[in-house]
């Protein structure tokens, strides 16, 4: 998620579903990005529990299974993005749900170079995931 930080977003990460719910309880957040298959609980279980305290908090599902998600999770989420889609797809969804562009922070040249490298590596990773997914579907 370093590429989101490079775009100006403050990012909280969790090891599993229960830790994510705890972050949502204690931090002021504008959106949740979650996977369907994660440690501790599935994405639909997470979304149901999140809705108890945060009924309006936008959920974006970023998953290798975006086309195979349970209908309940699809209804509870703002967007379903497949791992391997361009990074801009996620950024666009975040900007729509937060109704604002990420705040651009002043950055040093070294930090900006580091962010460009993180973005390049992230794009490469997502492209590789897409190729593997396509090869798996052909097999």
Image (cartoon, rainbow, N blue to C red):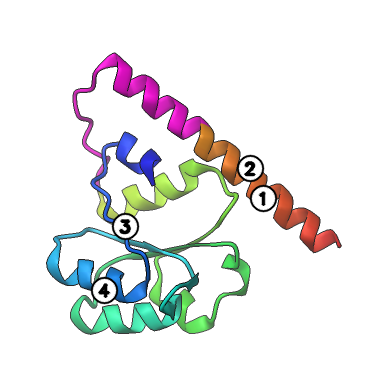
Question: Is residue 3 shown left or right of residue 25?
Answer: right
Give the image location of residue 60, x and y in percent. 40, 62
Are the residues tagged 1 and 2 within 8 Å (C-beta)?
yes
User: Closer to the N terminus: mark 4 or mark 1?
Assistant: 4
Q: Looking at the image, which residue sits at the far top? A: 109
At x 23%, y 31%, the residue is 104
Q: Is label 4 or label 1 in front?
A: 4
Q: Is label 3 or label 1 in front?
A: 3
User: Closer to the N terminus: mark 3 or mark 1?
Assistant: 3
Q: Which residue is mark 1?
A: 130
Q: Could you tell me which secondary element the residue under label 1 belongs to?
A: helix
User: Closer to the N terminus: mark 2 or mark 4?
Assistant: 4
Q: Which residue is mark 4?
A: 21
The residues bearing labels 1 and 2 have C-alpha atoms spaced at a distance of 5 Å
User: Closer to the N terminus: mark 4 or mark 3?
Assistant: 3
At x 32%, y 47%, the residue is 95
Q: Which residue is mark 3?
A: 13
**The label number, if any, that marks residue 127 in the structure image:** 2
User: Closer to the N terminus: mark 2 or mark 3?
Assistant: 3
The residues bearing labels 2 and 3 have C-alpha atoms spaced at a distance of 22 Å
Tell me where the magenta segment starts and ends, as one range: 100-120
């Amino acid at each position: 998620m370093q590429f989101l930080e490079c775009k100006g977003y403050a990012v909280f990460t969790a090891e599993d579903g229960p830790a994510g719910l705890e972050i949502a309880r204690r931090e002021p957040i504008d959106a949740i990005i979650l996977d369907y298959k994660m440690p501790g609980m599935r994405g639909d279980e997470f979304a149901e529990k999140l809705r108890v305290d945060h009924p309006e908090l936008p959920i974006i599902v970023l998953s290798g299974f975006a086309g195979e998600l349970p209908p309940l999770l699809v209804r509870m989420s703002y967007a379903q993005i497949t791992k391997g889609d361009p990074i801009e797809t996620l950024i666009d969804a975040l900007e729509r749900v937060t109704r604002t562009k990420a705040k651009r922070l002043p950055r040093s040249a070294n930090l900006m170079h580091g962010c460009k490298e993180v973005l390049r590596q992230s794009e490469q990773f997502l492209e590789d995931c897409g190729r593997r997914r396509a090869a798996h579907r052909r097999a």
